[in-house]
Image: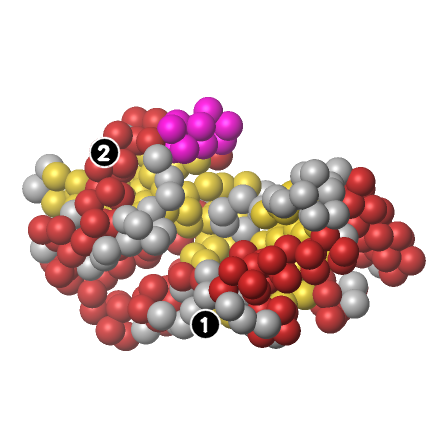
Amino acid sequence: LTETSPDSEIFDIISPYGYPGILVSEAAANDREFLDLAMNELKKTLQSMGVCSAFFRLHPILNEKFPEIFSPDMFTFNGETISVDLTLSEAQIWSDTNSKKRNKINKCKRLGMTARVVRSHEYLEDFWDIYKETMERVGALEKYFTFDHNYLLEMQDHFFEHMFLCLVEMEGEIASAGLYTECNGIVQGVLGGTRNKYYQYSPTSLETDYVRMWAKQRGNKYLHLGGGVGGAEDELYHFKCRFSKLRHNFYTLRLITDAEKYNYLVDARAKALNTSPENLLNSNFFPAYRSPK
């Protein structure tokens, strides 16, 4: 920051990767006055810590009703996510699966592929190798591959009892592996990958089919598959769509907690990009002062 900045230090915050969300009790959800007070207190607290903006990813299932219980203009729609309703019968879940996807699942079985769920620590190193190979194949190392080996180890330490791997194997070799968490009736797909030599057979189709039945048998309500990259209806989104008809709205909460500092940073960024502050403020990028172009 320059000497003309409004303060010596300015911060912004962002929620962790995934769908962390905000927890609200049933009593709080039915008390609009309390919700408004709580949100205002959050803004004041962040401002007192030198934070000028905050970006929160909301949980598509737990926070889906937020635009109804808060002011709807507080939230930004970022696309849809897909989940499997595990309260349906196995026959109905299979019927809701796209016919081409059912064919791929059956083909995997005919090829001799088998799936199983294990505790994540047993095969974490194998998963790491497969995930890296996948990111290299899709060219995502620089743009999306932000998780190092320590990240997985820390996840393992924190969520040991709630983290699992689904392995699809063929002739004694792991063809694909997916990392999942299980908590309060929701099984969440986190990360996954496929060996290059097996990619053409789509072993992740068998993996997803197996996990949803495994999750159902354990009494869970949802297998949340997530959406596309950045909420886009891309190839990943359409892959997930073929397993279920259930959709959820994915929202983000974008707070400007200190308008003076926020506008100062927007002005500085606009000058650096040789554009106007209005162009940045009218873009969909948040915070606007971190706009790449």
Horizontal arrangement in the rendering, residue 3 relative to residue 206 (left or right): right
Residue type pointed to by label 1: Lys
Is residue 273 in view from this perspective?
A: yes
Give the percent coordinates (x, y) of residue 177. 27, 44
> Measured along the vertical axis of the image, is residue 123 above or below residue 243?
above
Residue type pointed to by label 2: Asp
Please give the residue where the numbered disc 2 appears in the rendered image: 126
Q: Image point 34% across, 27% down: which residue?
A: 121
Q: Which labelled disc corresponds to residue 245?
A: 1
Give the percent coordinates (x, y) of residue 94. 36, 66
Give the percent coordinates (x, y) of residue 120. 35, 32
Q: Image point 69% across, 48% down: which residue?
A: 5
Circle 2: is it few (<14), some (14-19), or many (20+) Cα within 10 Å? few
Instruction: Say which of 41 and 51 sits in front.
Output: 51
Circle 1: is it few (<14), some (14-19), or many (20+) Cα within 10 Å? some
Q: Earlier in the sequence, mark 1 or mark 2?
A: 2
Overall secondary structure of the magenta section: helix
Cα separation between marks 1 and 2: 32 Å
Q: Which labelled disc corresponds to residue 183?
A: none
Q: In the displayed image of the protein, which residue is found farthest to the front? A: 3
- The quadrant of the rendering that contains the N terminus is top right
Q: Image point 46% across, 65% down: which residue?
A: 293
State the SS at label 2: helix
- Is residue 85 covered in magenta? no
